[in-house]
Amino acid sequence: NAGVTQTPKFQVLKTGQSMTLQCAQDMNHNSMYWYRQDPGMGLRLIYYSASEGTTDKGEVPNGYNVSRLNKREFSLRLESAAPSQTSVYFCASSIQVHTEAFFGQGTRLTVV
Amino acid sequence: QKEVEQNSGPLSVPEGAIASLNCTYSDRGSQSFFWYRQYSGKSPELIMFIYSNGDKEDGRFTAQLNKASQYVSLLIRDSQPSDSATYLCAVRADRGSTLGRLYFGRGTQLTVWP
């Protein structure tokens, strides 16, 4: 049982490049989330999807887009990467919006 | 903006002692509270959740919730060096336009020394 799987684990981008972070969960969870974690800032919600077919902005959505491809998959896209987006990105899922969330292993992204 | 505040660390306790981690939150309507442990370079791992006022015990861990005071805490009894990690408090918005969002504190770093 893999839980929440993120790809890639590490990525280096040049300013202005685009990329998509992939996330898939095999726990039949309805809700999925993307967070970024920066030193001294804690975990901040970028976007979330309460259920398949819906997405909503979190605290720091600027510069990002998301797609809830199906119940299992929730991707995060950086259209034009900026050095301020250097961070560790975590995907998470929960069975419903009111229940506990489980995290993937993270993607360490560096934008130079 | 929902706020979740944790007691500033780092917290250092000897092996075998009780470690007490505290968290306050601003949204009085929150009903769901979570404690995560995060080892350096790893992802957050859920260790406790609590929905009702009072205490909830799971092994060496006890979560305490006081909704009137908007306060949630985590006690770790018989602390072990393997408990050394950053502990994250999380509060879920359970109503309104932010329904479903999980807000995290900045974490408290705990070190348990032998």
Image: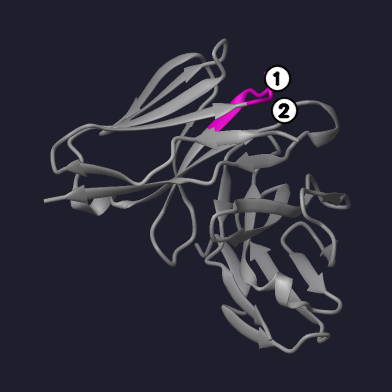
Task: State the residue at coordinates (81%, 74%).
Answer: A78
**Residue at disc 1, secondary structure:** loop
Give residue B29's mark.
1
Image quarter hosting the N terminus of chain B: top right
Q: Is residue A28 visible?
A: no
Task: State the residue at coordinates (44%, 35%).
Answer: B7
Left or right position of A109 against B43: right
Residue type at the position of mark 2: Asp
Q: Total marks drawn?
A: 2
Residue placed most toward the observer, B35 or B59: B35
Kindly identify which residue carries mark 2: B94
- Asked where in the image residue A72 lies, by quadrant, the reply is bottom right
> Residue B97: x, y in percent?
86, 33
Q: Is residue B35 above or below residue A15?
A: above
> Residue A12: x, y in percent?
64, 86
- Asked where in the image residue A98 lies, by quadrant, the reply is top right
Chain of the residue under the numbered disc 2 shown in the image:
B
Task: State the residue at coordinates (70%, 19%).
Answer: B29
Region in magenta? B26-33
Hey, which residue is sitting farthest bottom in the picture? A14
Q: Main secondary structure of the magenta part?
A: loop
Residue type at the position of mark 1: Gly
Give residue A99's mark.
none
> Residue B103: x, y in percent?
64, 40
Q: Are marks 2 and 1 in contact (CB under 8 Å)?
A: yes
Residue placed most toward the observer, B62 or A82: A82
Dot placed on the residue nearer the N-terminal end, 2 or 1: 1
Q: Is residue B109 above or below residue B34?
A: below
